[in-house]
Image (cartoon, rainbow, N blue to C red):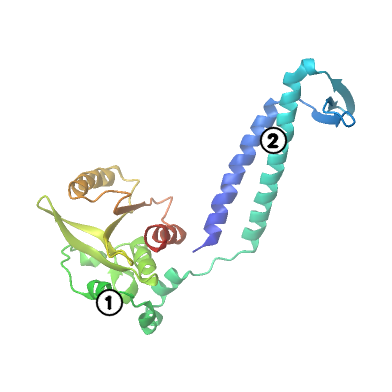
Amino acid sequence: MHYSDKMKNEAARLASVIANLNNELAKLPKGTLRIWKNGKGKSYRHYIELDGKRHSLPMSQKTLIVQLARKNILKKMLQDAQREKEAIESYLKKHRDGDSVTEYLAKEPYIEELVRPLFQIRDERLQKWAEADYPSTAGHTESLIHKGPRGQKFRSKSEAQIANALYKNKIAYRYEMDHTINGITYHIDFTIRHPKTGETYYWEHLGMIDSESYNHRFAGKLADYESDGIFPGINLILTYESRKFPLSISMIDEIIEEWFLQD
């Protein structure tokens, strides 16, 4: 998993937090609240520091006191967010992305072939299911150009990355297996067997989410899926990408961890 992706997202989130805190602080009264406790008693004196001078604040100005107290808290929150962002940015400056296992397997098919026994699925029945022939009439084999595990090829780089991640985690899957619903044969991207329960799950990757016609076609498919008991968030994983926002390896790994590897 690329932790740098998480760091970049966190840095972006902190930048938004810092901007919001600065906006809130700009709306509050000028000056800094100072508080002194009266000896051993439970009463306090309130002062405002402004332009190098200190002025007493009576309780008749409680609204101002509360606003300045809130300002003190927001300043502390701002300092925390700035320090955290600076620490993350320092890490990112020194960090250099390297290939994850998923990417390495895709780039080195011979290495993958050599170590294939290490990725043997523990459940022998699921291993046989994954290796058995199955109906797949998706066609357009000329578009299968992206290398994945076991010498298999996929239509997109993201699909190959999903396959490699499933393979790496010893999860049984089939690619574009025929699935007939309401008289129509669909080729769901991945049919997956849960490594512990053997239950069947599905994974569709929508690689052209910025295309209106593409989205419209998939909406029709989804209605048929649901009529056959295949529901997003239940037994159907949906991932998306556009030209501007590609699917990341870290996101794939997180999805697999959440759906198939947690106790």
Whether residue 6 is visible: yes
Whether residue 29 is visible: no
Q: Quadrant of residue 32?
A: top right
Residue 118 sits above or below residue 188 on the image? below
What residue did someone put label 1 on? Answer: 124
Disc 1/disc 2 C-alpha distance (Å)? 58 Å
The residue positioned 74% from the left and 34% from the top of the image is: 72
The mark that comes first in sequence, 1 or 2, is 2
Residue 210 sits above or below residue 91 on the image? above
In this view, the residue farthest toward the top is 60
Q: Secondary structure at mark 1?
A: helix
| Crowdedness near tag 1: few (<14), some (14–19) or many (≥20) residues, C-alpha within 10 Å | few
Q: Quadrant of residue 23?
A: top right
Q: x and y percent of residue 147 in the render?
A: 33, 71
* Image mark for residue 74: 2
Q: Quadrant of the C terminus?
A: bottom left
- Amino acid type, mark 2: Leu
In this view, the residue farthest toward the bottom is 114
Viewer-side residue, 245 vs 203? 203
Could you tell whether 129 is left or right of 63 in the image?
left
Could you tell whether 165 is left or right of 100 in the image?
left
Q: x and y percent of residue 47 in the render?
A: 84, 25
The residue positioned 72% from the left and 31% from the top of the image is: 71
In this view, the residue farthest toward the left is 183
Which mark is in front, 1 or 2?
1
